[in-house]
Amino acid sequence: MTINEVQDNIISDFSISDDWMDKYDLLIDIGKNLPAIDPRFKTNDYLIEGCQSKVWLRPDYDGQKISFTADSDAIITRGIVALLIKVLSDRTPDEIIGAELYFIDRIGLRQNLSPTRSNGLLAMIRQIKLYAMAYRARKN
Amino acid sequence: MRIIILELKDIAEIRADFPLLSKKVYNKPLVYFDNGATTQKPQCVLDAIQEVFTSYNGNIHRGIHAMSDMTSEAYENARERVRSFINAARKEEVIFTSGTTGSINSVAFSFGERYVGPGDEIIISNLEHHANIVPWQMMCQRKGASLRIIPVNDDGEILIDEFVKLLSPRTRLVSVTQASNALGTIVPVGEIIRIAHSAGIPVLVDGAQGVQHDVVDVSELDCDFYAFSGHKIYGPTGIGILYGKQKWLEELPPYQGGGDMVEKVTFEKTTYNELPFKFEAGTMNFAGAIGLARALDYVLETGRKDIAAREKMLLDYATGKLAEIRPLKIYGNSKNKISTISFLIDGIHQYDTGTILDKQGIAVRTGTHCAQPVMDRFGIDGTVRISMCFYNTLEEIDTLCTGIEKVIRMFS
């Protein structure tokens, strides 16, 4: 699936209910189902600054595509980073750098889902894009 | 039964004074439990601020015109009402600042310049808000001095015996909070002041979480400095108070230079204005000062003893109800507390709890509450904090408990 197809699927999943509690239940489920990160990568090297809860994000580049694993000590945050991984993991650096992440606004992740966590969300996206830029630079 | 009905009527009247309390969030009635961060404002305060700009706005202490005169008079009248509220001996001992943080920074700088040198020591406690830590650290770094920390026990209470041991010939000042913003502990500042004074050491009391909860009498307390913020006592933001005993304020150099704080300026030398103006450089937040004075009047009209009694009732009720929730642990179990409770639910991150409570219309604070050393003391990286005040209700506490049960269901 393309990045946009995955985004459209997420938008469709989150449109099942207008009740924010249902959306949170969905996000909590997604967070619980995020594959665990290898505990030895839960270090300060992979910690993302700017979140009230701790978020670890680790990239793995095979020369073609970057895959990400992540974890957070808060489940809602884990759900948010899991969504980003669904959309942006196993992509080439160019795909990641060029991605327009419209699903965030469409499911209300920015405005409604977590007003105070916006900074953390933006920090996560920035970190993913920085990794992609670094790998592209290394390849060139 | 009759008591309950009277109680409900009274509280309905009180709540009607605060326009924002009837607001809905996410289509649910707002339950506002973040008063430790900032309180809501009664209509009379909003009116007083509005009146400044619609009736007499002019810059203070400067103009020869009527508007300036009226504003200056209202501003100085506000100072007198603050003086009376905290029972300072003189109006000149009441300095308007931007808030508690501004007040403490001002003392840390000025006191440091005048009295602190290499090897000297400042004593604070483990309970302090960052605003009562960082300004002293900055000053200590500048002066080659160091901080000494009064430890707390597992209930979050100051260990007075340990405080006594920290006093040394190098101690220059003690700065302690009146009540912990993170745990709610009421600190026995009177005892700390008596002990420090017996060693000839002055004491600053951070009243940011104290002044709104009970009667504060700086003369009886005998503190050397007292700081508090307007917005935590139903007044506007951006205004606060530094009380200082005249003998200290006379001796300390000013913190900032600018207009109105000077007597005579030449390029070679400046002589400073008399108290309190020496510490009020530039155009002060006079609308804030007038709004704050109105808020203090409101507190007096409501009755400080009544406020304290109501808040004690809320604290006892909430503590009892929260204790019934099994996987919940309260941090800070001092015998004397303001109406603030910090807690964690076993296995659920404070941020998840706060987020789901918010969506139910319940405003709490999560995180370290600008008091990271307190969190370190208890080996945690944050809590959920409810900070109540007299306009909160028992029903709101019930709503909170129902909300917490829902959080537990969602995350288990």
Image (spheres, coloured by chain):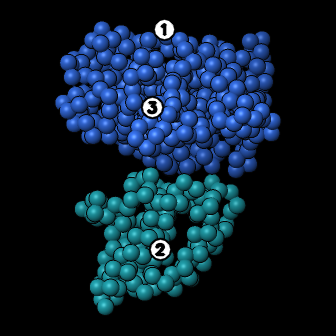
Chain colours: A cyan, B blue
| Residue B349 numbered mark, or none | none
Mark 2 is on which residue type? Lys
Q: Is residue A91 left or right of residue B172?
A: right
Chain hosting mark 2: A
Residue farthest along the bottom direction in this orientation: A140
- Of the two numbered discs 3 and 1 in the rendering, the one whose residue sits closer to the viewer: 3
Mark 3 is on which residue type? Thr
- Of the two numbered discs 3 and 2 in the rendering, the one whose residue sits closer to the viewer: 3
Image quarter of residue B156: top left
| Element type where label 2 sits in the image | helix
Residue under pointer 1: B220
Mark 1 is on which residue type? Glu
Measured as percent of width and height from the top left, residue B220 is found at 48, 8
Asked if both marks, 3 and 2, belong to the same chain, the answer given is no
Pick the front one: B39 or B132? B132
Q: How many marks?
A: 3
The crowd level at tag 2 (other Cα within 10 Å; few <14, some 14-19, many 20+) is some
Residue pictured at 30% horizontal, 8% vertical? B198
| Residue B271 numbered mark, or none | 3
Q: CA distance from mark 3 to mark 2?
A: 67 Å
Residue pictured at 44% horizontal, 56% vertical? A51
Q: CA distance from mark 2 to mark 1?
A: 64 Å
| Residue A86 numbered mark, or none | 2
Pick the front one: B329 or B219? B219
Q: Is residue B45 left or right of residue B283?
A: right
Image quarter of residue A116: bottom right
Measured as percent of width and height from the top left, residue B392 is found at 66, 28
Chain hosting mark 3: B
Measured as percent of width and height from the top left, residue B160 is found at 30, 16
Q: CA distance from mark 3 to mark 1?
A: 34 Å
Q: Is residue B368 left or right of residue A37?
A: right
